[in-house]
Amino acid sequence: MTLGLGRTLSVTLTGLEGTLVDVEAHIAPGLPQFVIGGMPDTACAQAPDRVRSAAVTSGVPVPPHRVTVNLSPASIPKHGSGFDLPIAVAVLAASGALRAASLAAEVVHLGELALDGRLRGVRGVLPSVLEASRRGVRHVVVPLENVAEAQLVDGVTVHGAASLGEVLGWYAAADAGAPLPVAEVPVADLGPQRTGPDLADVAGQPEARRALELAATGGHHLLMSGPPGVGKTMLAERLVTVLPPLSRDEALETHAIRSLTGHVGDVARLDPTPPFVAPHHSSTVAAVAGGGSGVALPGAISRAHHGVLFLDEAPEFSPRVLQVLRQPLESGEVVLARARTVVRYPARFLLVLAANPCPCGLSWGKGIDCTCRPPEIRAYGSRLSGPLLDRVDLQVHVPPVRRAALGDERGEGSTAVAARVAAARAVQRERWADGGWVTNGVVPGHVLRRPPYRLPHHATAVLDRALDAGRLTLRGYDRVLRVAWSSADLSGRTVPDADDVATGLVLRRGEQVAA
């Protein structure tokens, strides 16, 4: 058996950012030893035992010599069991048991090996194949469970294998001139948006429905406060039904995150429905922002990327969890610093908060038996800090539903509202195309305060007075302007007027508009 050098390719991930890895294997005379270098984690460092067993059961045992595997670049940590297959391919190429070694050196391999040689699916295949495509790799070999996910990437030929023995057979045939067999699973493309609960199911609440429509139009964060049972959760759950469907690039981003956090095989086709994520109020900072021991995985705010993050009973969340939202709300990404690396995940989400008026939820009107003491009510309300609320564009009170709203006539449905939102979004895309912005909610404030988008003084007079009186911060001033532009877009006006500005101010802080 020839001893020498073998190599192939794989991908390691730091967050969603991939790095192409050269998997090099060298076999030399000496006492039997199998060493992996290049900063492998525990799962990766355990690959030698799986590779040896899989190779034996596949009929091509690893030579009883010194085997050295290097994962280059060696300065970047390597995570997970997905390196099993590329390590096996490189080692068997070095031993001479794998034919067409030059072809194998140009193919990315991903997959975990069972002891009997079967290939098992792994997480993170979609972002890994995206990185391979960006680096010019045109062939990837993945387990059958990951084929549909890998085929979502354009320009890459996917080969799905059931076992290590099957991969060895492919390269033996390729040595005789046969091409690697292409996976036969149909390519999954962008499908239709999923149907969900309809906005027509919500009884009454015209003010909250208007705020929800504005939130969807401009990407404005929303706080709904009111007693239990008035429809706050129903409204939040129906927000994704009026948001525009995701583009292909946006869907790829959201599904790449899902590939890291979901079950293997969950990502089989692109769903253009914006994600809706509603973590429980007992969630930790790591669960919401991302993190964990070893590999820093995406949290709820990244899983809600391009969608809705709903915090029901928001005052019940830990103050540390609520404060960690502030930086992603401004930058659209979350940065997780670790001792050896910094991981970045996208987090451009629409935040929706729901809150009761007090711990028992009953301090909303006269004649209601509220059991909370005044200090408890004040403490409950202060759990949503000023800096966080300053980043929330729309704040609306959701009152109890009256009997008159329970008639037979249904309210306006999601389809009609979604059509208006889509038309307003189209206007925004055209207006802000030169700046690269998609919605009013992300346009920098200085752009709205300078020509050609600066509004006339008579339109902003009430807003200017609120700023001069200290009832509004400069950030709040800019956010009211953004809502005013969204209000104008929904109404078909090319420029906001005084009523649009007043709407933005009232919905932001519940201000009484001065005459």
Image (cartoon, rainbow, N blue to C red):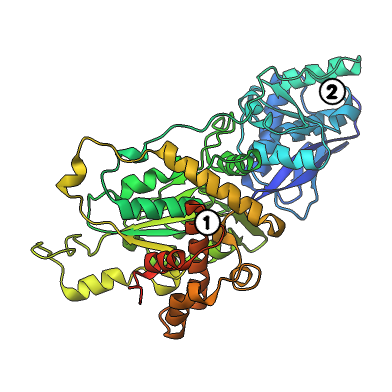
| Residue at mark 2 | 97
Q: Amino acid at mark 2?
A: Ala
| Residue at mark 1 | 493
Q: Residue 358: image x %, image y %? A: 22, 65
Q: Nearer the viewer, residue 382 or 62?
A: 382
Q: Is residue 440 above or below residue 18?
A: below
Contact (Cβ within 8 Å) of mark 1 with mark 2? no
Quadrant position of the N terminus in the picture: top right
Left or right: residue 185 versus residue 75 is left
Q: Residue 384: image x %, image y %? A: 36, 68
Q: Is residue 37 visible?
A: yes
Residue occupying the point 40% across, 50% down: 279
Secondary structure type for disc 1: loop
Q: Residue 169: image x %, image y %? A: 79, 16
Quadrant position of the C terminus in the picture: bottom left
Residue occupying the point 63% across, 46% down: 42
Q: Amino acid at mark 1?
A: Arg
Of the residues tagged 1 and 2, which is closer to the observer? 1
